[in-house]
Image: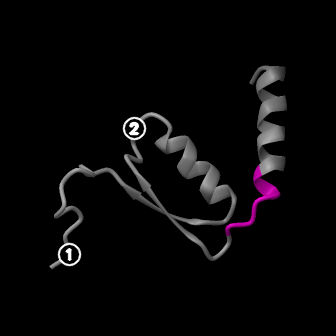
Amino acid sequence: MQPTQAKQSTESTKATQAINLAGQRVLLTQASDFMGPALAEVFRECGAEVIAADGPITDPDYPRRD
């Protein structure tokens, strides 16, 4: 890890420690695309339960639970 990356990582950790989402749930759509994986990690670091949805958000029957 480069020194700049280490500094950014430390700053990121400090920032997420200041945000307490313990006991909260976050629905993250398109979780496997673009910023999804990084956002899921940050929300988990903040204590949130992350519900990651990868299905098509334009389909009104997704997710359908019968």
* Start-end of magenta stretch: 16-21
> Within the image, what quadrant is residue 19 found in?
bottom right
Q: Quadrant of the N terminus?
A: top right
Find out whether residue 58 is within the magenta segment.
Answer: no
Q: Residues within 10 Å of mark 2 (few under 14, many from 20)?
A: few
Residue at 63% x, 77% y is 23
Residue at 80% x, 48% y is 15
Kindly state the secondary structure of the residue where label 2 is placed: loop
Q: Nearer the viewer, residue 59 or 47?
A: 59
Q: Please state if 33 lies on the left or on the right of 26 as rendered.
A: left
Residue at 84% x, 48% y is 14
Q: Earlier in the sequence, mark 2 or mark 1?
A: 2
On the image, the x and y values in percent for residue 13 come to: 78, 47
> Within the image, what quadrant is residue 6 found in?
top right
The amino acid type found where label 1 is placed reads Arg
**Disc 2: which residue:** 33
Q: Residues within 10 Å of mark 1 (few under 14, many from 20)?
A: few
Q: Which mark is residue 8?
A: none
Residue at 61% x, 66% y is 48
On the image, the x and y values in percent for residue 35 come to: 50, 37
How many circles with numbers are drawn on the protein?
A: 2
Q: Which mark is residue 65?
A: 1
Q: Please state if 16 lies on the left or on the right of 52 as rendered.
A: right
Q: Nearer the viewer, residue 3 or 13?
A: 13
What secondary structure do most residues of the magenta stretch adopt?
loop
